[in-house]
Structure formats: structure tokens, C-alpha cells
Image (cartoon, grey):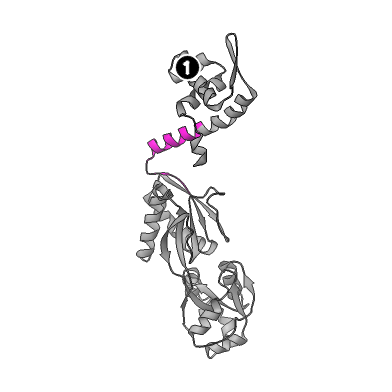
Amino acid sequence: MLARRYMPPIAQLAAFEAAARLGSFTRAAEELDLTQSAVSRQIAALESRLGLALFTRERQRVVLTPQGAAYAAEIGPALAQIGNATLNLAANPGGGALTVAILPAFGTRWLAPRLPRFLNAHPGVTINLTTRLGRFDFEAERIDAAIDFGRDIRADTEAAFLMHETVLPCASPAFLAEAAPRAPADLLDLPLLHVASRPRGWARWLAGQGVDAPLPRGVVFDQFATMAQAAIHGLGLALLPDFLVQDDLRDGRLVRVFDAAATSHGAYRLVWPAGRGVYPPLAAFRDWITAEIAAGG
């Protein structure tokens, strides 16, 4: 907001940019379909606003001052970006580019298989996906939205609820055949696999089965997908989101243990910067993904 207070009128900037690029007030006037005197007045007003000279006048020539050259180097790309944005909006009012930060497991196993449906329904939208394990920063990164998991929503963001996370205790058939647990308490004597983002997952699952135990130890992974592969290869038992292991369960690479599921603390949400929700590609994606989940897609 502070920067906007110092923003000169676009007409002044356009006259300055054209004159700086063409090296002539007269040629700038021709390009902008103005008179030479009108261009001169706009640039004089801009110089007065800034309190410094942008050009030196030498007979029939104008030459950028060092300050003017530095200013032009930044103003030119900014005006080009505004022009391109306006052209793209006019040509494709419902489209544009959308950059979404995704959690690796959710993005690859749930979102990716369904994304063609969104793209087919919104051919004007280009989706860019970037993975994030930790916190994303809308101010520091060029991200329009993020799929996040947790319980807290920051004050400078808005969010749409997507779904809760149901986790299933799973292991490979060979591991279960050898370990042969008879009751949930037996799992305390077996290697349990953990994911760093859900440090109390096993403790909560065991408590739900009536087993009061301290936080179990075991190998910790930074991603669900890596932990799932470790479980498939017999390293231990893992609590895994149901959407991540559907194919592995169907094909027999993993087996559910005790057929008992649990709901993780927190939820998946689509999050975006406050006030950004009206951006057409983001609004279309938000409406699509919430409807897809509500329909059980």
C-alpha cells in the first residue's frame, strides 16, 4: 500500500517510457497518438512529481539522465507486464495461469489423476504445480494458492475446506505373515514407521484402540510416499492416508492391519492470499476441487 502512494499516473509513465525507448519526444508522440507538446507536458509533470530531471534537453535532442535511465529500466518491463495482462484478460477472460503449491502425496496420488477433468472443463487455464513440504510464503513466492494440511489458518489468508485425512495402518503381506500381530497392543513390539508431519499419529491410533502407550519410536520419513514404499518392502507398519494406498491395497502390495482407521488432527485446505479469491483461474479451481471432493471423485 505504501508503494501505491508514490505511483505516478499511467499516462505520465507511458509518455516517459516511450520517449526513453525511442530517444525522442516527437517519436513518442507519434507512437502514442499524442502531440509533441502533450508528451512534453506529461514528462515535465512526472519530473516535477519526482523532484528530479529524467532528461537533459540538448537543442533538438533529449538524453536520459543517469537517474532517468535507471528509472526507465524498471518502468519499461512493468508497463509491458500491465499491457500483457490486459491483453490476456481481454482475449481470455476466464483463463490465465495458476500456480498452486501442493503437498507431494496429495498432489501426486489424489490431484494429478483428476487434474485432466479440470483442464478439460477450463481449457483457457494453465496450471503450474510446485511441491512444498514446509510452510509456503505468498509474499516471497509467486504462488496463487496452496493445498495445505493443518489446523491453523493465517490471518492474511483465506481458505476453503477440502477434506479430513483418514489414515490406515498398513504393512506388506510378507511382514504381517511373519509378525502375526493378534491385537493392537502387539504393534508396540514391531517396527512402526512414522512421517515427520504427523509425529503423534501412531500414539493417537493406539489410543483409539484402547492402548495407552508412550509415543512409539521408529524410523521417521519426510514424505508419505517414501514411507509407503518402505512398508511395501517390509520395513515395518505405517499409518498411511487412504487416498495414497488405494492402488497398493487393491493390488495386494499392502494389507490393512486390524481394519481400523483413524482421522488425523487437522484437514486439507486450499489456501490463498486474502483478496485473491476473485482471480478467475483460482475461483474456477476452487469451485472445481471442492465439488470434486464433495462428489467423492
Q: Residue 140: give x, y in percent of width and height.
A: 57, 49
Decide if residue 39 is on the left or right side of residue 293. Answer: right
Q: Residue 247: give x, y in percent of width and height.
A: 48, 70
Q: Is residue 77 above or below residue 125?
A: above
The local crowd at label 1, few if under 14, some if 14 to 19, many if 20 or more residues have their Cα within 10 Å, is some
Residue drawn 44% across the image and 52% down it? 274
Q: Quadrant of residue 189?
A: bottom right
Residue placed farthest to the bottom in the image?
A: 182
Q: Residue 118: give x, y in percent of width and height.
A: 40, 53
> Quick one: quadrant of the C terminus?
bottom left
Residue placed farthest to the top in the image?
A: 59
Closer to the camera, 280 or 79?
Answer: 79
Q: Is residue 78 above or below residue 127?
A: above
Number of callouts: 1
Determine if residue 253 is in view. no
Decide whether residue 94 is among the magenta residues: yes
Residue drawn 47% across the image and 57% down it? 155
State whether the magenta stretch is mostly helix, strand or loop: helix
Decide whether residue 112 is among the magenta residues: no
Q: Where are the magenta residues, as a range?
A: 79-98
Residue type at mark 1? Answer: Ala
Residue drawn 64% across the image and 75% down it? 219
Circle 1 — which element? helix
Determine if residue 3 is in view. yes
Q: Residue 158: give x, y in percent of width and height.
A: 43, 56
Q: Is residue 20 above or below residue 107?
A: above
Closer to the camera, 103 or 231?
Answer: 103
Closer to the camera, 89 or 76?
Answer: 76
Label 1: which residue?
A: 29
